[in-house]
Image: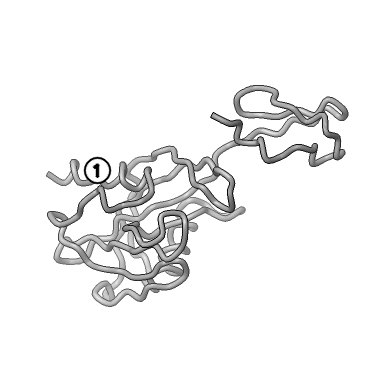
Amino acid sequence: MTHPLDKFRFCPVCGSADFVENNFKSKRCGACGFTYYANPCSATVAFIRNKRGDLLVARRGKEPAKDTCDLPGGFVDMYETAEEGLLREIKEETGMEVTAAVYLFSIPNRYLYSGMTIHTLDMFYEVRVGEETDCPVAADDVAALTWMPLDQVNPDDFGLHSIRQGVIRYLAQQT
């Protein structure tokens, strides 16, 4: 496996080409001593259920895994808590307001973006939304949204590894 920082050939502080692997998660500059750690990015994922118990399933509108099933969520921005990021992403992708969110579990993931593998820590939440749950609007990077009964949810339809694993785990907890 390639190092997560292989795309970075020069020290971001002094510009030296002597920017080499320090250990499995960092690179160190031989010229100025700067060490950069490739820590995972935070991301959130929402299991949104309506009053009938159906799950809101998204269709990815962009790569990676374009046109496969997904769940609402995304990267947490700087200066946001995971919960703030979750609420923002749900609003951006569905137009819905969150009324309650309960943390369930996390799964590490690798997300290919612009030719680079981004290591993420995906945090999964069970989410309740306001009264408009039967009419979410697909927006941002979501091509479509569908309410799906849990017995029709097929984990193999989910294109991103961590989401697929999260769906498997969530469905197992529902029985």
Callout 1: SS: helix
Residue placed farthest to the top in the image?
Answer: 23
Give the x, y percent position of residue 56.
27, 63
Q: Which of the colour schemes (rainbow, by chain, secondary structure, one colour) is used? A: one colour
Image quadrant assignment for residue 5: top right
Q: Report the residue at 87% width, 28% height from top.
A: 31
Residue beneath disc 1: 168
The three-letter code of the residue at mark 1 reads: Ile
Give the x, y percent position of residue 123.
41, 45
User: What crowding class fits label 1: few (fewer than 14 Cα within 10 Å), some (14-19), or many (20 or more)?
Assistant: some
Q: Report the residue at 55% width, 44% height from top.
A: 118
Q: Please, is residue 43 above or below residue 66 in the view?
A: above
Q: Report the residue at 47% width, 49% height from top.
A: 43
Give the x, y percent position of residue 175.
12, 44
Towards the viewer: 84 or 54:
54
- Horizontal arrangement in the rendering, residue 71 relative to residue 173 (left or right): right
Give the x, y percent position of residue 37.
66, 33
Callout count = 1
Q: Please, is residue 146 above or below residue 6 in the view?
A: below
Image quadrant assignment for residue 22: top right
Q: Report the residue at 35% width, 48% height from top.
A: 163
- Horizontal arrangement in the rendering, residue 135 relative to residue 22 (left or right): left
Image quadrant assignment for residue 33: top right
- Horizontal arrangement in the rendering, residue 168 relative to residue 120 (left or right): left
- Horizontal arrangement in the rendering, residue 35 relative to residue 172 (left or right): right
